[in-house]
Amino acid sequence: MPQTKPFLSVRSLSHTYHTNSGETPALRDIHFDLFPGEFAAIVGPSGCGKTTTLKMISGFLKTDKGQILVDDQDITTLAPEKRPVSTVFQSYALFPHMSVLENVIYGLKFRGIRKKEAREMGMEYLKIVDMEEYAGASIGEISGGQQQRVALVRSLITKPKVLLLDEPLSNLDAKLRVKMREEIREIQKKYEITMVFVTHDQEEAMVLGDQIAIMDQGKLVQIGKPEEVYLHPQNDFARDFLGISNRFTDIHGNTICCRPEELEFAAEGSVKGIVRQEEFLGFYRQYYVETMNHEHIIVRTDRNIKVEAGKEVQLRVK
Ligand code: ADP
Ligand code: MG
């Protein structure tokens, strides 16, 4: 499928919160394009502006500066309900006086779908998240994780063109997270939904994202394919944020930055140290090495390479 035209364009978006205690510049010149059906995962530390970015795309916050386009339409000043955008916020905002099923099918009401058909669709979507037996339950009767699943299918069922998700899997246990992320990916592919997904889970971002966007202090540090961002981080922040990264001084006095898997033990390496700890992690081993300058390095090797703690070693960048 030739993808020559962006579907979602975010242009130089900026926002400052004005409160009694002063002004917080939360976003500065956020700029990116997504093609139809592309999946962007936004990662970044708490407070870097992820939620603010979603709120601006969805229209719940006014834009101070910048522009948002969906399918060539400028939506910057449209009210949230007029935008072809659906959002799942961290606080799920389900309707407490409606049952689980009624919540899920609420958005279908305005699309001319008959009640019987809507209920059937609702049950189908509840099945995806293992919640069909709770269809008649009220929102107060289900757990936070279950509410998160209901909020998710409530927005998926309307098959929006642009879907924004703010840490939608954060309240789920590890196993369900993996299952749900596969479901999200499948639905997203099937209906070619252009998706922006905020997560603090790097693995989730790498698995799901066609594009990974790294944010820091209201700025977009880098956006690119997972491989690109991991192998060619734009700066130290991007390198440290995505995956584990080492920084140490070698025997020539040079600063070396590298990933744990880029190092190996060698008879003559570029840095000397002592193995402080060894961990068997199934398909690899992880070593903690303290250099002569008391810097700490993490090394990941094939699980067959075994070095005892306390041993003096040398390391080389592969
Ligand atoms: P993230 O989702 O990445 O954790 P947010 O977008 O929620 O970050 O917040 C970005 C910055 O804006 C933070 O410094 C936060 O304290 C501030 N902020 C967020 N919401 C408000 C608000 N309603 N009023 C004032 N400041 C806010
Ligand atoms: Mg947030």
Image (cartoon, rainbow, N blue to C red):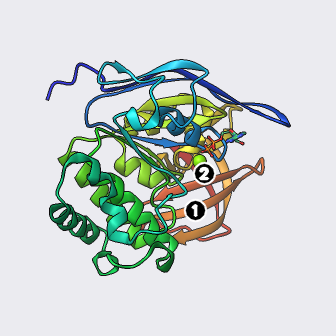
- Where residue 38 sits: x, y (%)? 30, 36
> Sequence-wise, which precedes: disc 1 or disc 2?
1
Residue 282: which quarter of the image? bottom left
Where 297 sits versus 1, above or below?
Answer: below
The extreme right residue here reads: 21
Amino acid under label 2? Gln
| Any part of residue 70 in sight | yes
Distance from mark 2 CB to nearest ligand 1 atom below 8 Å: no
- Where residue 116 sits: x, y (%)? 16, 66
- Judge from the rendering whether residue 255 lies leftward or rightward of residue 149; answer left or right: right
Quick one: label 1, few (<14), some, or many (20+) residues within 10 Å? many
Q: Which residue lies at the image location 84% right of the left edge and 36% below the top edge?
A: 20
Badge nearest the viewer, 1 or 2:
1
Q: Label 2's element? A: strand
- Where residue 184 sits: x, y (%)? 31, 55
Residue at numbered disc 1: 287
Where 211 sits versus 15, above or below?
Answer: below
- Judge from the rendering whether residue 44 lies leftward or rightward of residue 116; answer left or right: right
Q: Label 1's element? A: strand
Where 112 sits versus 312, above or below?
Answer: above
